[in-house]
Image (cartoon, grey):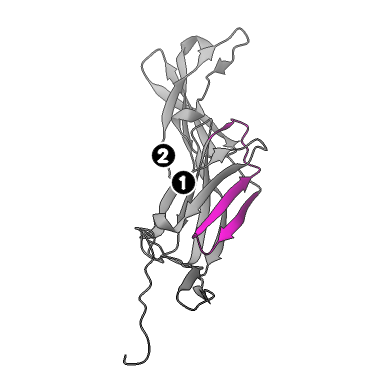
Amino acid sequence: GSTGIKGVRYGVWSSAGGQDDLRWYTASKDGNNQWTADVSIMNHKTAGTYQVHTYVDLKNGTSMYAGATTFIVPGPKASEIAIENADNVSGTFEIKVKGVSSLAGIGSVQVAVWSASDQNDLKWYTAQRDVEGNYTVKADIMNHKGNYGKYQVHAYATDGNGIRACVKTSSTNLTKPSAKFEITANATNTKYTVKGSNIAYTGSTGIKGVRYGVWSSAGG
């Protein structure tokens, strides 16, 4: 009977990672002879299935296992990553993470961007929420050792429960452009103007300036 019960405890943990987030919650007895405890997901910060094991503490100092159940906690999600306004010359592209949502609310969205196979040029960007509710940020190859090529883009959202999850992935290609040059002469052929375009850089320092070395072919 219930007269011998001193208290009830619930052992709660998320299935992911085993019992590394095991917490004990002490229940309170209400007028309907029910034992209730509130589980704060911030103590676990994991999405998915949760295990609940019930233990009864008796007045004689012993405890006994009384049963188990489960519940599911949804994590943050997103509907799409859009890569927009890619510019091979400036080495930039815009990332727009759309449809980011969670029943617990969204705390932040970060985007991991890299091109190297060993991720040695990986950088985390913090996206900002725009007026349409999307989370946007601009990536720049200056932050990735000036590398051209295929870029991986992974978006992570952290919700109000402290659950951080990869919500969408995408990729894009930045191709180093071929430089173009235009030479025009003045009316008397005493001065020639050199105009260069599509001059891109590699390396993380960026372009400080451009110089033209000029000589006549005759005589080397």
Helix, strand or loop at label 2? It is loop
Q: Residue furthest bottom?
A: 219
Q: Position of residue 127 (x, y in %)?
A: 52, 42
Tell me the magenta residue range.
80-107
| Total numbered labels placed on residues in the image | 2
Residue 104 tag number: none
The location of residue 76, given as percent across then percent down, is: 58, 40
Q: What is the number of the mark on residue 125?
A: 1
Farthest residue toward the top?
31
| Residue topped by disc 2 | 19
- What secondary structure predominates along the stretch shown in magenta? strand
Residue 178 seen in the figure: no
Q: Is residue 97 magenta?
A: yes
Q: Earlier in the sequence, mark 1 or mark 2?
A: 2
On the image, the x and y values in percent for residue 119 come to: 39, 60
Residue nearest the viewer, comparing 184 with 85: 184
Q: Residue furthest left?
A: 219
Residue 64: image quadrant is top left
- How packed mark 1 is, by other alpha carbons closer than 10 Å (few <14, some 14-19, many 20 or more), is some
Residue 188 picture location, percent across and down? 50, 77
Instruction: Give neighbour class at mark 2: few <14, some 14-19, many 20+ (Cα, 10 Å).
Output: few
Q: Nearer the viewer, mark 1 or mark 2?
A: 1
Residue at 46% from the left image edge and 12% from the top image edge: 4
Q: In the depicted view, which residue is nearer to us: 54 or 186?
A: 186
